[in-house]
Image (cartoon, helix red, strand yellow):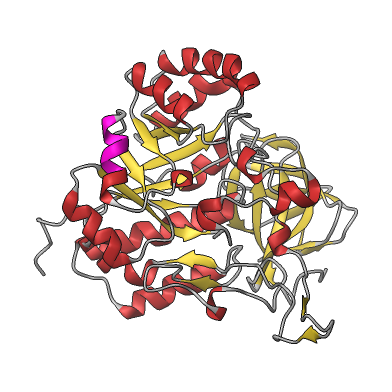
Amino acid sequence: MKCRTTINIPELAMGVKNRAALVACKDNADAVYFSLDRFSLRARARAISLEEFDDFVAFIHSYDIKAYLTLNSVIYPNDLDELDRIMDHVTSSDVDAVIAWDPSVIMRASDAGLNVHISTQANVSNQESVEFYKRLGASRVVLARELNLEQIKSIRKSTSMELEVFIHGAMCQAISGRCYLSAYLLGKSGNCGECSQPCRWDWSLVGEDGSTVDIEGHYLLSARDLCMIEHIPELVEAGIDSFKVEGRLRDTRYTSVVSSCYRRALDEYRNNKFDSRHVNIWMKQLSSVYNRGFSTGFYFGIPSREGFIVEKDMNASQTLKELVGEVVNYYKNQSAAYVKLTDSGLNVGDTILIEGENTHLEQHVSSIQVTGSNIKSAAKGMDLGLAVDGRVRPNDKVFRIADSDKCGSE
């Protein structure tokens, strides 16, 4: 079958919060975007300090992946000196781009000769806005998530600027994430990276007469996650330069599974092998990691009731992570870990995830030893030797991956 040679395959850009997340997607991503411990809309992703920045960028580049630094929070007057300190450091680094929307960051990055990607927070929704940021020195725009596919195609025809769109991950119920609920209710501003997600709370809809309206659920503001894997051909053919996956705060298994599915989708489209059978397999895999149910967002029209998951609290996945224990030590020569079962039992044949700041390892349990003897099952509270397929580290957490109705079994 003849391969396509005239269609540009977009870059796949994954959000990562630490080295472990990078390792989880290193074989699939073309680029990753990440935050420092300040000036980001993911303030809880604090794993990378300015002092660690250069090493982290070098670690990314060691896998031949591009590194994009996200500096997309609101910048206040008292932040400017700290911003200058960060930009002085970033300017002398090998980072591939800075993602920003506050003009103070855009001007500093552009003046320093850095590639600037305009964040979706800027709500860029037409070609004239794209050209405005191009004149400011930007090399790419992340388009507003509220655009439909036809509008994106129209913008593509009118500009040579690189265009990036979100294709998977959490959706905010507010236009371009400009939500004030968290700031109003809890004093934690989403625009400064501290969103406490009140849109995911249990709410009631009350009429003017005081009666409660029943709409078959109480999570009235909780938007479903975006999932566009079924529509990869249409997105590629729209001429988009980069596909972006949200999820800097999600676990490494999410990063691994989602990046793998979209990598295969892009590769199979490239090779004329993209079909519904593969889509069904990918959808099942995507559903096995953290999600709030799926929708196509605004791509094919303004979402209504089907765009919200009113009946479920947060995670809709039927596959859950259950904490089992913690790694105490690692023995390279024996390919084994000393593990304390602090929270649950473990059996030969279980699927486990070992996760830490620098660790991502998913495998089946092939061997368990206690005091030198092989056993098939170990109970909560036991210390054991566990055969591992790769490097793990002290204090890494060990999780069992299982259907939600099976979690908790020993």
Q: Nearer the viewer, residue 228 or 399?
A: 228
Q: If the image is split into quadrants, where does the N terminus sit?
A: bottom left
Kindly report the secondary structure that dominates the magenta region of the rendered protein: helix
Q: Viewer-proximal residue, 123 or 365?
A: 123
Q: Which residues are magenta?
A: 130-135
Q: Residue furthest front?
A: 208
Residue 118 falls in image quadrant = top left
Q: Position of residue 40 (x, y in %)?
A: 58, 35
Q: Is residue 235 located in the magenta-colored stretch of the structure?
A: no
Q: Is residue 168 visible?
A: yes
Question: In the rendered view of the protein, which quadrant contains the C terminus?
Answer: bottom right
- Is residue 270 rendered to the left or right of residue 192? left
In-front residue for pair 50/74 = 74
Q: Residue at x 48, y 32 (%)?
A: 102
Closest to the observer, 152 or 294: 152
Exactly how many numbered labels are in the figure? Answer: 0
Asked if one can make out residue 42 in the rendered structure from this viewpoint, the answer is no
Instruction: State the image coordinates of residue 181 (x, y, percent, origin top left).
Output: 70, 54
Q: Is residue 35 above or below residue 374?
A: above
Determine the residue positioned at 35% across, 80% down: 277
x%, y% of residue 406?
74, 75
Residue 256 in the image: state x and y as whole percent: 50, 53
